[in-house]
Image (cartoon, rainbow, N blue to C red):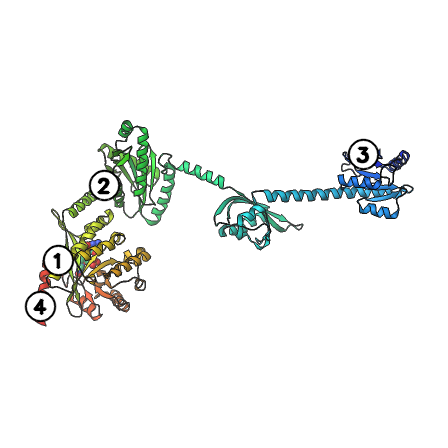
Amino acid sequence: MSKPQDSLATPKPLRILMIEDVEDDTLLLVDYLQSGGLVFDWERIDTERDMIVKLKESWDIIFSDFSMPSFSGMRALEITRQHDPDVPFIFISGTIGEEMAVEAMKRGAQDYVMKENLVRLLPAVDRELSDAQQRRRHRDAEKGRTQLAVILEATPDLVAILEPSGQLRYLNGAGRRLIGLNPVEDASHYFLRDLFPENIAERLLGEAFTMACEQGVWHGETALRLVDGGELPVSQVVLAHRDAAGDTEYLSTIARDISERKRFEAKLQYEATHDRLTGLPNRFFLVDRFKSALEYARRNQSHIAVLFLDIDNFKRVNDNLGHAAGDILLGQVAHRLQGCLRSNDTVARHGGDEFTIVAGDLSDPEKVLIVLHKLNEAFERPVIVHSQEIYVTFSVGIALYPHDGDGIETLLRHSDIAMYRAKSAGSNQYRFYASDMNIRGHELLKMEADLRYALEHEQFILHYQPQVDLSNGRIVGVEGLIRWQHPVRGLVSPADFIPLLENSSLIIPVGEWVLREACRLHRTWRESGFDGVRLSVNVSAVQFNDGELLDKVRRALQEEEMPQQALELEITENILMQDPVKATEILQSIHALGVRVAIDDFGTGYSSLAYLKRFPLDALKIDQAFVRDIINSASDAVIVEASISLAHKLGLEVVGEGVETVEQFEFLRLQKCNLAQGYHLGRPIPELQLSQWLAKKRQQHRTSS
Ligand SMILES: Nc1nc2c(ncn2[C@@H]2O[C@H](COP(=O)(O)O[C@H]3[C@@H](O)[C@H](n4cnc5c(=O)[nH]c(N)nc54)O[C@@H]3COP(=O)(O)O)[C@@H](O)[C@H]2O)c(=O)[nH]1
């Protein structure tokens, strides 16, 4: 007979509780069992009270008589089952009848054996002990499952069981709440992509499931898709569960909210990369941003400027107003510096009263002057600290990539050296590390100052170039072209100063002056009886994107009582192609005013006629580069022919620019080009000369007709 103990090494005696009123019967039974090889300890009781006391101990098996004078076997069974549903309970009785025995089994007795015939007892003990053990294991497992289910439902982590396809089998309470699934809804209608954003669901199905199936487990950081559309960062584990054949039967996953940690990490990251006082990036962050700027500059063959700024006389602020005031000043300086730079540029606090700027994506080194210009503008107004006005100036050192180095450390060192040179030259100075740039930089800044002076002292004038109708030779319009009447240099070409005006934003007031001047001249013509001649002016990119352009045009028209259709704005195709959607909106508003729009320098940009049909335009000016060679270059001739023909199909008037010869003129006339402009028909000339010329032409026409 097998012993029911788990350990074979030290067999523990069984504990048997005997419920029997006759002691001799008990001894006989004990004797029988011992002679059958059973090792056990035992106790005998025969009252309900003793039984209740004894059941507080643990028993391996209970034998009970059926009927006793002061206790009933059925009652003993009932009490036992209340205490322990699994302990084997066997009736050993001489009196139990068949019917009662069946009833006893129904109520939870495992067996009954007749006192007179104990042969079945030992096998029954053996069997019942083993069954009881199994029942206990089963019950423990069931209990464990119930406990786990309670834990799973109570945990704040998402727990899910999934098919390898990503379909859900089970989702716990936390998961249901996160994705907005009600507690009774069947989770198997849902998939991984209902729990996670698209890209993460794909990563889990790919990388995570594959690794879990191969190695048993995958963990990583992902994010859950929340019911409100937001995302919750989580730390996630995916486990693969295999069947007996080793194939993945299902997967489970646990995802834990790590938003608090992420916030903390972000805070740490921010603190590690930003200056506490000003909130600006610190040196480390600057290095990082420089790397991105460098990659871009290498790809696009552009330049980067590293500027080292030191506030002039900062110590005086600290000494006179105190350190707290100094701190406020630094904060305000930081704020203004950040406000005046492009979003891609980086301004960092280097320490103390020193700041560094990395300005990338400069098409040429001189573009750094735009940054200097913006700095000057930003600090034209004083900074107010404790009601005191403080005018802030900087000593600025500039180093350029690739000219002065290709690493941030070198460029910072060189800009620092340049800053010291600037400082030793006095306050509010800048110096380039490379001396040749200093000369060029000074020249350009001087020229910018001269242009400002030119605007204030009316040194700009307009010259006018006629546009002639190719079908009858009449003048239908003139183009106003700016010149700078410099007191020393004489008449300066716009090609030499328009780019500088554009860089410094001076083009806005100068452009407005051109517009007003042209409208003023048109009024004098109308007053002298020259009606029907149109006037066109050039509009630069900065002007075109100036939110006030429309108001300025409207005001000029009103004040000079100019007919709207007599004014034409010339805009190059490149300006339109920078942001076609925005350009369309602006052009529509210009058109709504009744003003004409011509596309200038057509053919030099990247647009196509098909694209241009989206814009509300009136005329197209074929660039002089094509007209120049129409006689000698077959390809240019074809381009011009095609442009004229397509433009006509789009309802546009066509102007041929730069017509210098009679052959070019004839070619355009034969191609039915509408207007021509160029030295062959007349160079740009001053107002007085033009008025005389118009008068002469009018006279000629009167005589000929
Ligand atoms: N934003 C503004 N830009 C302006 C303004 N005034 C002029 N400009 C632009 O400056 C560029 C140079 O202008 P300019 O030196 O005046 O040259 C113009 C003509 O003189 C020249 N032209 C005309 N006919 C001929 C010719 O037969 N041969 C030849 N070699 N050159 C000729 O072409 C220029 C006309 O330019 P466009 O505007 O494209 O019609 C120039 O880009 C001007 O746009 C201004 O007020 N604002």
Q: Residue furthest bottom?
A: 705
Q: Nearer the viewer, mark 2 or mark 4?
A: 4
**CA separation in Å, label 3 and label 1:** 130 Å
According to the picture, the residue beneath numbered tag 4 turns out to be 700
**CA separation in Å, label 2 and label 4:** 57 Å
**CA separation in Å, label 3 and label 4:** 142 Å
According to the picture, the residue beneath numbered tag 2 turns out to be 436
Q: Amino acid at mark 2?
A: Asp
- Mark 1: secondary structure: strand
Q: Residues within 10 Å of mark 1 (few under 14, many from 20)?
A: some
According to the picture, the residue beneath numbered tag 3 turns out to be 49
Q: Residues within 10 Å of mark 4 (few under 14, many from 20)?
A: few
Residue 395 picture location, percent across and down = 26, 35
**CA separation in Å, label 1 and label 4:** 20 Å
- Where residue 616 sits, quadrant-wise, is bottom left
**Camera sees residue 253:** no
